[in-house]
Image (cartoon, rainbow, N blue to C red):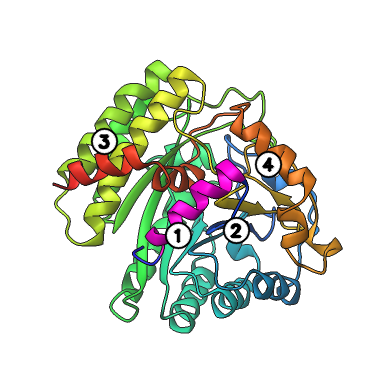
Amino acid sequence: MISLIPKLPAYWAFRRFGWPRLYPFSIVVSISYKCNSKCRTCDVWRKPNDDMTVAEWRQVFHNLGRTPFYMTFTGGEPFLRPDLDELVIAGYEECRPEVITIPTNGLLTERVVERVARICAACPGAQIGINLSLDGLGDVHDDIRGVNGNWERSMKTWEQLKALQPRYKNLVLTIHTVISRFNIHLFEETYAGLQKLEPDSYITEVAEERVELDTVGWGITPLAAQYAPVADFLSAQARQKPVKGIARFTQAFRAQYYQLAKRTLQERTQVIDCYAGWASAHIAPNGDIWSCCIRAEPVGNLRQTNYDLAPIWFSPEMAKLRRSIAAKECACPMANANYTNMLLHPPTLVKVALDMV
């Protein structure tokens, strides 16, 4: 994190003046749409697949160089790709990010545990965050995820991942809950139950209607009035949890994020400036470049530029999309992009510092 802070003013200038021209420091890599869940909040598993190979991804990462600080490898279900470990290791070797995050539904226990162990061993300089998705307790989770026995299999995966931690000090285990209209009425009960699993970190995100997930018009997002007390509860919990070191910053950061998400749902506009398209980017499984997965508007394809981001990232098409984002023609509470936005918003950083004090 310390290495990133001196670079933030350059991103402010990039957004305002178009110079200096910079690659994003936060990159989401969608490696496949394939998924073995049939979630009530996602339809990505129905999408056709044209996944890039590990060799193609390595070329992408090589051309990116050492700019990425934070890389997320997502899907679909990432662990459905048997070569996920090779892909993540290629990203680490070429880009040297300090943080790598991989979400999972936990259904493929043996593969998850085996691949995570190899990734942790091969990427010693990165924090490896494995986010287990749990949207409820027991049958509630199974119903939302559309797979009978999902909860039981996820618990087996969690137990075995926990057993890896004494061996791999860079492994961070997180539980992630998507808050939707299907589970918001049970949230405090769900929260209490999930805390018993003793995650290193607990995060939530609002279910959104995303172009990427083909969920536009589904009505899955909770009402602002429903989410407001949940956000206040989460912010209070984040401030009360006794943590030390960098975790203090993370918890204070999340306390502010939940309030930002609440205001975004209430006001239906960008509460703070969005840096998607400047400091953060999303790469689709086929090499399409998006500013983010909410809009998922391709501005070019890496297969057509010899896997080089530069011709796309600094193109007129990308500039047009940036103007739309800067004009606040979109707004969302998506966690990944908003964490980047908050890092680049000085008033939020001041609030975080005050929370830490």
Position of 251 compared to 176: left or right?
A: left
Amino acid of disc 4: Glu
Q: What's the mark number on residue 7?
A: 1
Residue shown at 39% from the left, 26% from the top = 262
Amino acid of disc 3: Ser
Q: Residues within 10 Å of mark 4 (few under 14, many from 20)?
A: many
In this rendering, the answer to whether 191 lies above or below 121 is: above
**Residue 212 at what x, y percent from top left?**
68, 41
Task: Tell which tag, 2 or 4, sits nearer the viewer.
Answer: 2
| First in residue order: circle 4 vs circle 1 | 1
Q: Which residue is mark 4?
A: 212
Q: Is 343 colored magenta in this rendering? A: no
Where, quadrant-wise, is the N terminus in this rendering? bottom left
Mark 3 falls on what kind of element?
Answer: helix
Q: Nearer the viewer, residue 102 or 100?
A: 100
Q: Residues within 10 Å of mark 2 (few under 14, many from 20)?
A: some
Residue shown at 71% from the left, 74% from the top = 54
| First in residue order: circle 3 vs circle 1 | 1
**Residue 91 at what x, y percent from top left?**
59, 73
Q: CA distance from mark 2 to mark 1?
A: 10 Å
Position of 195 compared to 340: left or right?
A: left
